[in-house]
Amino acid sequence: MAYIFNAGTGYQVIVENQGLQTAVATVSSSPGQQQSQRTSFNTGTWTAPPAAFRTPAGIVLEITAAQGRYFVNVTATGTSTVSDAPNLAGAEELPAQEGVMPAVRGMEPMKPMQPMQPMQPMQPMQPMQPISPVEPMKMGDMEMRMNPMEMRIGNMSMSMGNPPAAAVGKNFCSQCGAAVQLGDRFCGQCGHRLM
Ligand SMILES: [Zn+2]
């Protein structure tokens, strides 16, 4: 929750404790135009509501936080912390209203990083469907056959390697009993790892 102090005609000082920061916004509005500035100071958590005083030098905010008291000098030209307690004798204390800190475009403080989401567990890899050694792949007049690899384009053909005879023989999955090729790493039926 923010505290709003009306510092003068169309001029407001809004202060809010945001975590360990004290954010101070000044808003001055003239007809058709609103100007706002926003600054943050590292003060720690407030232990008492803020107070604002009108002094000849400008508005002085008094922030009472766990780490101590802070005075913030708010003038038309800027907002700055004051190291020494200013003389507030005779200063007019401004009444506070509760409100909302205005959003100031382009001057938003950095939002804290969202904590990393834990990694989603990986979906187990689906085993590759083995390319049927029986049905050749056909694309136009191109024909491709696995085990042994053989490629035929038109009346031109080429083959690669001559696997041992056993490698083209039938084998069976020890998990589900489906017929698999000896060279297959996974059963095409149940995904059981074969090698
Ligand atoms: Zn299987």
Image: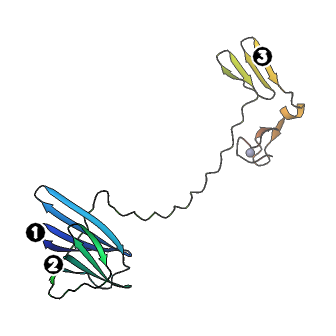
Q: CA distance from mark 2 to mark 1?
A: 16 Å
Question: Which of the two residues, 17 or 162, is positioned nearer the viewer here?
Answer: 17
Residue 101, disc: none
Residue drawn where x is 15% and y is 73% of the image: 6
Q: Quadrant of residue 98?
A: bottom left
In the image, taking residue 6 as reference, residue 117 lies left or right, namely right
Q: How many marks?
A: 3
- Which residue bears the numbered disc 1? 9
- Which residue bears the numbered disc 3? 157
Tell me which numbered mark, 2 or 1, is placed earlier along the sequence: 1
- What amino acid type is highlighted by mark number 3? Ser
Q: CA distance from mark 3 to mark 1?
A: 92 Å
Residue drawn where x is 17% and y is 59% of the image: 34
Question: Which of the two residues, 5 or 164, is positioned nearer the viewer here?
Answer: 5
Q: CA distance from mark 2 to mark 3?
A: 98 Å
Tell me which numbered mark, 3 or 1, is placed earlier along the sequence: 1
- What amino acid type is highlighted by mark number 1? Thr
Q: Position of residue 146 (x, y in %)?
A: 76, 28
